[in-house]
Image (spheres, rainbow, N blue to C red):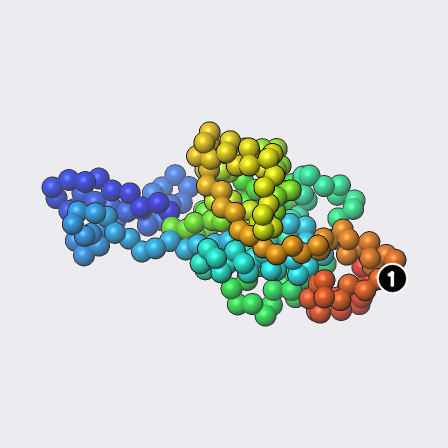
Amino acid sequence: MRIFGIKDKCINFLHKVVWCESNIVIIEPITKDKTERGVLMHKPSKRYGIMGGTFDPIHLGHLFIAETALDELSLDEVIFIPTGLPPHKDQETVTDSHHRLLMTSIAIDSNKTFKLSTIEIDRKGPSYTIDTIQSILQNHKEEVEIYFITGTDTFMEVDTWKHYKDVLQMIKIVVATRLGYNDRSFNEKVDLFTKKYKAEIIKVTVPILEISSSDIRDRIKVGKTIKYLVPEGVEEYIKKNQLYQ
């Protein structure tokens, strides 16, 4: 929730939002000890990284990007959100959500700052980013900042998202790029979003990791090893359930 105030001679005219449900907003006065020299002070917001994807399967590249963003941006948590019915992909080629959810859970189990959400898998119908972001904001009483972590390919498709202009106002977009990345189309889109829509785009540099879920699936089909491409537990799960064969 955003904290707001009305500056007046009397400190009792300062208020803050403490909870919002439906169309009812509950406010409470801010006492004098929460102000300093007439400037409204408040508890720092929670900073959540959001990493969505089909995770079919999740791999070490996903985890390293999430950890890099967590470290460099001082995030409190990174929430992994496997998609339910991704609108941009052929539904028939996506592995059952049950398997993708369990593989993601296995992959992040050892990291206490990585969390798992079933918000999109539980939702009936296509998974749209704006619906997910709105749900996250509505379910948190405290003020939160959302950092949407993605790669350059997905970033270039942002303007095809449902209500993308609204999305750009609600979140900060963190784009993982390799060292020295200087693509003209990418730079032009960053300029467009920041200047026209006042979006906040943050670039995070990560080492080149030539790992993709599609390549992992292809390797499994032809009997090649995927060791060190996915967490050990995920590799075991794939073998046990004979996925991607």
Q: Specify whether 10 is left or right of 188.
A: left
Q: Specify whether 59 is left or right of 38.
A: right
Image quadrant where residue 55 sits: bottom right
User: Where is residue 12 shown, x and y percent of the image?
Assistant: 16, 46
User: Where is residue 32 shown, x and y percent of the image?
Assistant: 16, 53
Q: Specify whether 168 is left or right of 238.
A: left
111 up-or-down from 185: above or below: below
| Nearer the observer, 140 or 184 | 184
11 up-or-down from 221: above or below: above
| Nearer the observer, 119 or 228 | 228
25 up-or-down from 216: above or below: above
As drawn, the residue found furthest toward the left would be 9
Question: Residue at (70%, 54%) from the top-left corner?
Answer: 210
Question: Residue at (60%, 50%) from the top-left corner?
Answer: 178
Q: Residues within 10 Å of mark 1 (few under 14, many from 20)?
A: few
User: Where is residue 199 shown, x and y percent of the image?
Assistant: 46, 37
Please count the marks in the image.
Answer: 1
Question: Residue at (47%, 49%) from the top-left corner?
Answer: 146
Question: Residue at (60%, 68%) from the top-left corner?
Answer: 109
Location of the C terminus (image quadrant)? bottom right
Residue at the disc numbered 1: 223
Is residue 128 visible from the viewing direction of this image? no
User: Where is residue 120 shown, x and y percent of the image?
Assistant: 61, 48
Is residue 89 visible from the viewing direction of this image? yes
User: Which amino acid is tagged 1?
Assistant: Gly
| Nearer the observer, 62 or 182 | 182
As drawn, the residue found furthest toward the right would be 222
Q: Specify whether 118 is left or right of 192.
A: right
